[in-house]
Image (cartoon, helix red, strand yellow):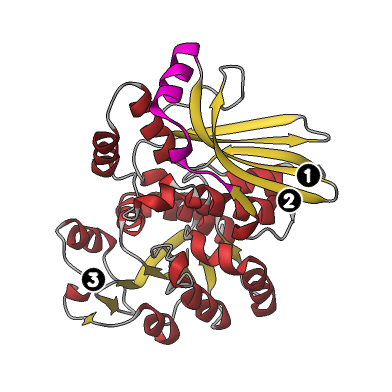
Amino acid sequence: MREIRFLLIGLGNLGRRFCELLAEKDAWLQERYGLALRLVGAADSRGTAYSPDGLRPALVAQFKREGHSIADYPGVGQPGGSALALVMSAEADLLLEASPVNLSQGAEPGLSCIRAAMRRGMHVSTPNKGPLVIAFRELHELADACGVKLRFDGTVAGGLPAINLGQRELRGAIVECLEAVPNLVTGYIMDLLSEGVVWDAALERARNEGVLEADASWDLEGWDAAAKLVILVNAVLGYPARLEDVERTGLAAVSVAELQAARERGSRYRLLAKAERVDGGVRLSVQPVALTRDHPLGNLGRKQMGVVYHTDIFGSITAFIEELTPVPSAASMLRDILDIFA
């Protein structure tokens, strides 16, 4: 039995559900993989908790469901403690970094926590897009220099292993073009609008479902899809894409009448992220597109995301996921952990 001590930064939708997932699967993980995952430290926006003897994931999840902070954890909670200070002082083998994206604030505290963890010899798994968008190459070079592994399969399309598919299963191929619908909520909203639901009501339903970011513009203006495209292109195409390289058009460019007309024709609008190799470079775009039924992504439901890789030797390969809750996104961290240690 191998014990893996880990820190968890961020206890929102993904962090809390990861704790629930670990409480459910702990015995099975020990039996199947010989791994005992021990949560020794955690941080949220109000404080931290650290215990070398371990925190109880089920209790952490309960606190968060009830609206409490990890700082309220009996005996070891630290109100006002910072995530970075925890990473700098705690003894652990692994960092799970699931804090908010915060691209407007330099992807902090996630970026600094990841850097600090790797410099201290910790492996890292993160579903946080921000650090990878801002410092993709730097973080990979740092991981190599520190002799640790960096995994981030959950940064794109939730629980869909889009990055793993492109990086591993397409080895030896040139990906000439990739198309993705990596953002769930935009398709959900466009479907509602096409069915006659008014704009404000569609947004409210998306918020109630927990699929719309607190800053709705992040989704609706295409920033989320653009960030995910940048990560995919860096990871799979090996091209140093930046967020400013993406030609981006949001949902406001499509009228409700156009959405309804497409529905009547049997098509569905989706916010399509696309990367094409052209003239020695890569053209990147995110825009609403009416996808016909014969398009590989044209049949995605309102809670589905997908990716298509067009290659020189493997043909075109499509994968999609139906993500009814945030659990698959949270589970991407478990997949990363098993990739690192199992």
Q: CA distance from mark 2 to mark 3?
A: 40 Å
The part of the chain drawn in magenta is 248-266
Q: Would residue 4 be found to the left or right of residue 153 on screen?
A: left
Residue 257, magenta (yes or no): yes
x and y percentages locating residue 329 in the rendered image:
43, 48
Q: CA distance from mark 2 to mark 1?
A: 9 Å
Q: In this orientation, which residue lies closer to the viewer: 58 or 2?
A: 58
Q: Residue at x 37, y 82 (%)?
A: 86
4 up-or-down from 185: above or below: below
Q: Would residue 147 be found to the left or right of residue 320 on screen?
A: right
- Please identify the quarter of the rendering in which residue 192 is found: top left
Q: Residues within 10 Å of mark 3 (few under 14, many from 20)?
A: many
Task: Please tell me whether mark 1 sits on a helix, a strand or a loop.
Answer: strand
Q: CA distance from mark 3 to mark 1?
A: 46 Å
x and y percentages locating residue 98 in the rendered image:
41, 62
Q: Are marks 3 and 1 in contact (CB under 8 Å)?
A: no
Q: In this orientation, which residue lies closer to the viewer: 126 or 103?
A: 103
Q: In this orientation, which residue lies closer to the viewer: 16 or 233?
A: 233
Badge number at residue 120 = none
- Given the current orientation, which residue lies at the most extreme top position? 265
Q: Report the amino acid beneath label 1.
A: Arg
Task: Please tell me whether mark 2 sits on a helix, a strand or a loop.
Answer: helix
Badge number at residue 237 = 2
Sequence-earlier tag: 2 or 1: 2
x and y percentages locating residue 244 in the rendered image:
61, 59
Q: Residue at x 77, y 29 (%)?
A: 315
86 up-or-down from 282: above or below: below
Can you identify the residue that label 1 sits on? 277
Residue 179, magenta (yes or no): no
Q: Are marks 2 and 1 in contact (CB under 8 Å)?
A: yes
Can you identify the residue that label 3 sits on? 70
- From where the camera sits, is residue 249 visible? yes
